[in-house]
Image: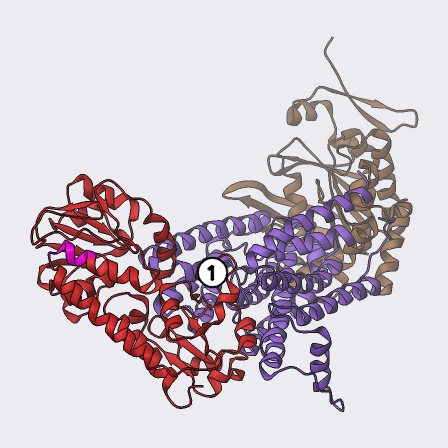
Chain colours: A red, B purple, C brown
Amino acid sequence: MNRARIAPRVALVLVACLVAAGCGSPGGGATTEPAGAGFPIEVAGTVIPAAPQRIVSASASHTEILYALGVGEWIVATDQFSDFPPEAGATTKLDAFNLGVESVAAFTPDLVVLSYDPGDLCAGLAALGIPTLLFAPPLTLEDVYGQMRALGAATGLEAEAGALVAGIEGEVARLVAAVPPRETPLTYYYELDPTLYSLTSATFVGGLFGLLGMHNIADAADPAGTGFPQLSAEFVLAADPDFIFLADTRCCGQSASTLAERPGWASLAAVAEGRVVPLDDDVASRWGPRLVDLLAAVAGAIAAPGGG
Amino acid sequence: MTAPRPLRRLSPLAVGVALVLLLGALLAGLLVGAVGLSPGAVLAEVADRLPFVSVDSGLSEQEAAIVWDLRLPRVVLAALVGATLAAAGASYQGVFRNPLADPYLLGVAAGAGLGATIGIVTLGSASAVVPAAAFAGALAAVALTYALGGATGGGRAGTTLVLAGVAVAAFFTAAQTFVQQRHADTVREVYSWILGRLSTVGWSEVALLAPYAGVSLMVLLLHRRLLDVMAVGEEEAETLGVSASRVRLVVVAAATLGTAAAVAVSGLVGFVGIVVPHAVRLMVGSSYRVIVPLSVLGGAAFLVLADLGARTLAAPSEVPLGVITAFVGAPFFAVVLRSARRGWGP
Amino acid sequence: MSGIIARGVGVRYDGRVALEGVDLEVPAGEWAALVGPNGAGKSSLLRALAGTVPSSGTVAVGGRSRHEMSRRRWARLVAAVAQHPVLPAGLTAAEYVLLGRTPHLGYLAAESRRDVVAALAALERLDAGALASRPLGSLSGGERQRVVLARALAQDPEVLLLDEPTASLDIGHQQQVLDLVEGLRRERGIAVVAALHDLTLAAQYAGRLVLLDRGRVAAEGPATAVLTPEGLAHFSGARVALLRGPDGELVVAPRRPA
């Protein structure tokens, strides 16, 4: 999900609270009962009768997780944003904005993975007896690990999921440990789009930055606690963050040079001294195995000479 | 209200009051913002730029950039947009003899919306093509309105044009909705453009708008006496030697040019074009000789203050400008209406 | 001052013939009244003379035809008062009358002191000087009609066209308005062409009557020649008796059969 991430994300947190009968919402932090080797297995309220061999994934993050678990060959359809790994891009596409019960059921799936529930899709699929997992956006790394384990259980690959999680945990710990300690924390501004929508440290991505010991300037601008405040140019200028991370490089063509052209932005230390870090929109907005790449990119940027 | 004099001219007093109001608004816009800068420091910073004056304002480089690269161009642009829209609204009210006329009457808003939507869905909202597309869309809509409704002559030409504008606006709006539906992921960007905002403007937008606003304002101000003549209707205007269709064409062209350029840089800001001329009319009478110039000054002051509200009410984020003008415009207008009605006779 | 000469004037609205082959000559200082039933073409003729409606034939003032000159130049020669004038409620009478100076100004020019003086003088001449500061919306019917006439006078025309100037006025104000027009005619030698529905007033004020019927001139001449009971019964379907007032003036009295 690129540009859709904001509205659906906020909506999703609300939607995830609705658990239709038979529609599992592992969401954040929910653990599943480890079944034995066998099926049927219950994952957060949804019974999955057998190891799925026809999976529909309408969530780009979970598509990546499924491929990392090795079940890519059993994926029959994905949404248009599921483009990684490259094989995922070649699967049949559903329109994430126009998901209907018929269009999904037409693939006769035995497992459907969603990250948001448009118009009672969950309930509709449950009524047809199709096991569906609705994953809310995670707020912490633990939430992500929980979702990975849930998918592992749902596909009968608990061991692979455990290994995936362990690998990510180890990588994260290594990156965090490699960050040199600082007297005053580095401040950063994270840009979601050119109208200055940002995210705070209370979000998943913001939490990752927090692991690296960085301080988010948007935290002061979000009294309502939405997690995604819109900042004003004056605010960013006055805050003069040490680093600027751009998550709108692909959707909206932003870069260090376009930032320098914005009125007044050339006076920012980060712009003048080359501390504007472009991120891959997709990597920065998903919570699959590539979150390690995001963390590595950030850690590498702040560790480089010239970085604070 | 005191008894009107036989011939109301543009009194220096009224102009003076309006100018003071505008300057006050500009000053407030400069001193107040999302980030609290001490007024003294801001004034010192401005004074420092004057020739022969050298003052240390104590502002950091970023804070100085806030004053010169963010607030000042934004305040100037708000004034230009407000002046242009108010003059266009007043002129439309005169040339169509319709108190409900606003600058978007002939399809400008719908055309600009369609142009902007197409620009945003193809190239993203940060692209420089979007204002140009909005401008082109606005002009195309009015041209189409004229082609549809300008064919008839005689006493009903004005009404026919307005009705053609309604049809064109409906068509363009439907087209815009269709395009938006096919690209639902850009809904938020398009919506935020439509609601009107000055949040990303700098001196380049001022330079973009200034020539169009200048031409538009100049032509409209020059035609204010003719607007008074148009008040007696098209047929009687002809007996007075004025070609109603020619006056209408020139006024519409000038107003559209200014409005299209204003909309291109600021999005759709409503209410200014209809409320400011009415408020001026209630205060100083019905002659367009007086209404147009005072609407220019009043519209500029109004929008500068509305933008101030947009920047500060929900700081550090922004309220869309169109929302502020509607929320503020309506009660403001009600107050003016009540106080004026007490003064007027039956 | 010159009069107005119309030859072969015809007006069509969407293919319907409203006027055909009308000749009319009103020398300077003369008053011609247009009479006839509703729909006879009186308003159409006045519009054709004013030039606000496309017409065939020629209309000329002082030897110069309408086609030879700009709209503005024509408006300096011919002033027209509409049947239902638009009176913007917020304008004062003086501002409204000042609009009458428009034909004497350039396209974008503003009025001069002379124009203001002319406008106020026109109001005075029409016994409406006291109304100068009053907003139009606050005027009575009679006052409004005088202000409208003042605007026409401010145009300083050679020809004055009036479309039912006395409709909706009470009898006192009817006479007041017509007396004022009569005064202008005498003083300035203005040629007056007025459509009047009241035949008695037409007979008493106009030197010549022109009877229109279905777009053509049916009769023309002094009142005694045009207004005959037989003629009126034929063209208007009215039953009238022609009487004489105390000073010999012609009175057209409607008759109700006993």
- Residues shaded magenta: A150-156
Chain ID at mark 1: B
A152 in the magenta segment: yes
Image quarter (top left, top right, bottom left or bottom right) of the C terminus of chain C: top right
Q: Name which residue type carries label 1.
A: Ser
- Tell me what residue is drawn at x 84 percent, y 40 percent: C143
Q: Is residue C80 left or right of residue B303?
A: right
SS at mark 1 in the image: helix
Q: Quadrant of the N terminus of chain C?
A: bottom right
Q: Position of residue B91 (x, y in %)?
A: 64, 58
Whether residue A101 appears in magenta in the rendering, the answer is no
Q: Nearer the viewer, residue A105 or C117?
A: A105
Residue B253 picture location, percent across and down: 56, 64
Residue A80 in view here: no
Residue that numbered label 1 is attached to: B192
Q: Position of residue A279 (x, y in %)?
A: 34, 76
Query: Which residue: 82% across, 54% down?
Result: C154
Q: Is residue A16 left or right of residue B133?
A: left
Prevailing SS of the magenta stretch: helix
Q: Is residue A303 above or below residue B110?
A: below
Q: Position of residue B262 (x, y in %)?
A: 56, 66
